[in-house]
Image (cartoon, grey):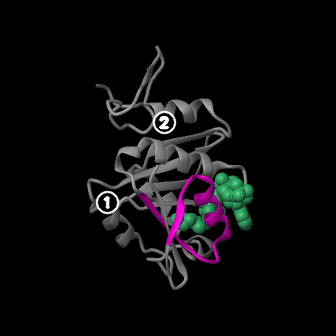
Amino acid sequence: MPNCDGCELPTSRQKSKDNEAETLCGACTELREGTPSVWVSPLESRELELVLAWRSHPEVYANFRQQDGPLTWDEHVSWFESRDTDRYDFIIHFDGRRVGAININQANEVGIFLGDFSAGGHGVATVTVEWLCQRFDYRAPLYAEVHDENQASKRLFKRCGFQQRDADSDWIEYVYDP
Ligand SMILES: CC(C)(COP(=O)(O)OP(=O)(O)OC[C@H]1O[C@@H](n2cnc3c(N)ncnc32)[C@H](O)[C@@H]1OP(=O)(O)O)[C@@H](O)C(=O)NCCC(=O)NCCS
């Protein structure tokens, strides 16, 4: 079974679509045909500079539970090289440009951020989280941890079918279990 030309994961778990130009899994087929114009590709080492810059912006890392300052290059590279094999990171493309990243880790927690703020408010995160939920549905339940004050993210996960489960002080856990 070939790998998908989008997410580069095996198409075997999902209904795939083959045409002369490309082979896509079901989730990437829906993304390709949907609006807004969003695409995903696996994070590559040549994109680490871009992700470092995005993740070092205070308005981005303010929303991360496990990061409270800008990253250093060495810790960023060592994070990339030591990732668990069950973790997947993808770059989000919007209108043909790279605007952010989404991931699922070994504990089935979903993380997403836009580093290019000009892409915000267009539904980019919504279709990307929906894509990830479809692509990794065999790993459900999926989780997301969101700060109580992060209104955009709370709305995002609710809209994508996540249910609020536990609240640990300021952090809310959402679960997706279709
Ligand atoms: C959260 C984030 C990914 C949303 O991206 P986005 O592409 O702008 O989101 P969408 O356009 O798909 O909208 C998703 C929901 O968020 C709402 N939203 C978007 N921007 C918002 C804002 N600034 N304030 C309040 N709500 C907002 C939208 O209205 C929508 O909710 P609705 O469907 O109920 O109307 C983006 O704001 C971001 O990167 N934030 C910083 C990182 C972060 O918080 N990541 C989540 C931690 S896991």
Residue 13 vertical position relative to residue 71 in the rendered view, above or below: above
Residue situated in front as seen by the camera: 50 or 66: 66
Q: Is residue 148 magenta?
A: yes
* Residue indicated by mark 1: 106
Which residue is at 33% across, 66% downward?
Answer: 79
Which residue is at 42% across, 74% downward?
Answer: 72
| Marks 2,1: beta carbons within 8 A | no
Q: Residue furthest bottom?
A: 169
Residue 63 vertical position relative to residue 97 in the rendered view, above or below: below
- Start-end of magenta stretch: 142-165
Q: CA distance from mark 2 to mark 1?
A: 20 Å
Q: Is residue 108 magenta?
A: no
Residue situated in front as seen by the camera: 133 or 69: 133
The amino acid pointed to by label 2 is: Ala
* Residue indicated by mark 2: 27
Please say whether residue 130 is visible from this viewpoint: yes
Residue 156 vertical position relative to residue 133 in the rendered view, above or below: below
Percent position of residue 21, x then y: 48, 18
Q: Quadrant of ligand 1?
A: bottom right
Percent position of residue 94, x then y: 63, 44
Find numbered disc 2 in the image and state the secondary structure of the residue it sits on: helix
